[in-house]
Image (tube, rainbow, N blue to C red):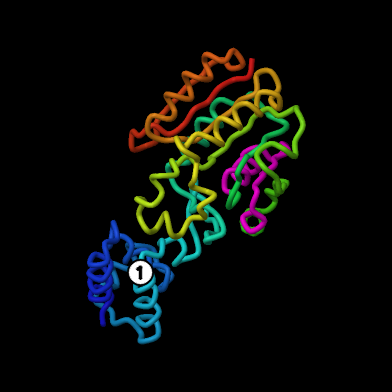
Amino acid sequence: MTVKDALRTAARMLGEAGCGEPAVDSELLLMRVLGLERYEMHMAATSVLPADRLEEFLSLAAARAGRTPLQHVTGEAWFMGRRFLSSPDALIPRQDTEATVEAFLSSLPESPSRLLDVGTGSGIIAITLAIEFPECTVAGCDISRRALSLASSNAALHAPADPLWILGDLTGPFRAGFDGIVANLPYIPTDEIDSLEPEVRLADPRESLDGGPDGMLLIRRLIEEAGSLLRRGGVLALEAAGRQPAILADEMSAAGTWASVRAGADLSGRPRWITAVRT
């Protein structure tokens, strides 16, 4: 079977299974199997695939057709231009979160000395911060030991970036003195989880999705706790969705603890983040 025929076969399989971007996913899977860039793969469109490579490719395509997320099939995900490991032990890294991190980075005071990523999961945000600010102490906190193990493995890919990994519930293990706190906490309302795509509701840990009745239970807890941990002028950045950023921004503006409260969107124009400065 040629490269072109293999791609068509896999794309048809994924399309029939209801996968969102069957052609794109098929290309990414075959690129991984062949170790080629997209243009190289298409230049070899009429080449016959070796039997072992074809078998490997169709096996991966079958896993994806079973609605296993692409990131779990390949074992990797990309975030802000960097490769990270991905597994069912933590929320799959998503490009939407890049907007939250970029808003956080642009709001931070110059040369921060202490930063905290709450609910770090796979560690992508904490590691990104450690790379951006090599002289800064960065900590990533999570309630899941398995997530922290994955985060540690990801940090090893990006040495010398080496955040502190702390097991704990939100900011419980920490004392005051942070220049910035960022969090992508669960924000899906409990009664909406069962209606999510299989790649989300069956693959991501439920504790990484369930944000309580209105999706903002843990986020509001963090807002309350963060006020006592941030220095004056320190920045809090949060990820949320739908009407949540606007609601949270209004609540924070009225609280008196926060100034320069902003809510913004991701690259798709969807509400995605809130930033605020500790007064």
Residue 267 is situated, as x and y percent measured from the top left of the image, at 37, 37
| Residue at 70% over, 24% down | 228
Q: Is residue 85 magenta?
A: no
Looking at this view, name the residue that lies furthest to the right: 175
Residue 265 is situated, as x and y percent measured from the top left of the image, at 39, 31
Residue 150 is situated, as x and y percent measured from the top left of the image, at 62, 58
Q: In the image, is 181 to the left or to the right of 98?
A: right
Number of marks drawn:
1
Q: Amino acid at mark 1?
A: Gly
203 lies above or below 9: above
Q: Which is nearer the eye, 53 or 220? A: 220
Q: In the image, is 22 to the left or to the right of 233?
A: left
Q: Is residue 139 magenta?
A: yes
Quadrant assignment for the C terminus: top right
| Residue 261 in sight from this viewpoint | yes
Residue 131 is situated, as x and y percent measured from the top left of the image, at 63, 43
When asked about the image quadrant of residue 42, the answer is bottom left
Instruction: Tell me the magenta residue range.
Output: 124-147
| Residue at 55% over, 22% down | 276
Q: Which is nearer the eye, 149 or 200? A: 200
| Residue at 26% over, 71% down | 13
| Residue 152 in sight from this viewpoint | no
Q: Which residue is mark 1?
A: 66
Q: Regarding mark 1 in the picture, which secondary structure is present there?
A: loop
Q: In the image, is 96 to the left or to the right of 183?
A: left
Quadrant assignment for the N terminus: bottom left
10 lies above or below 115: below
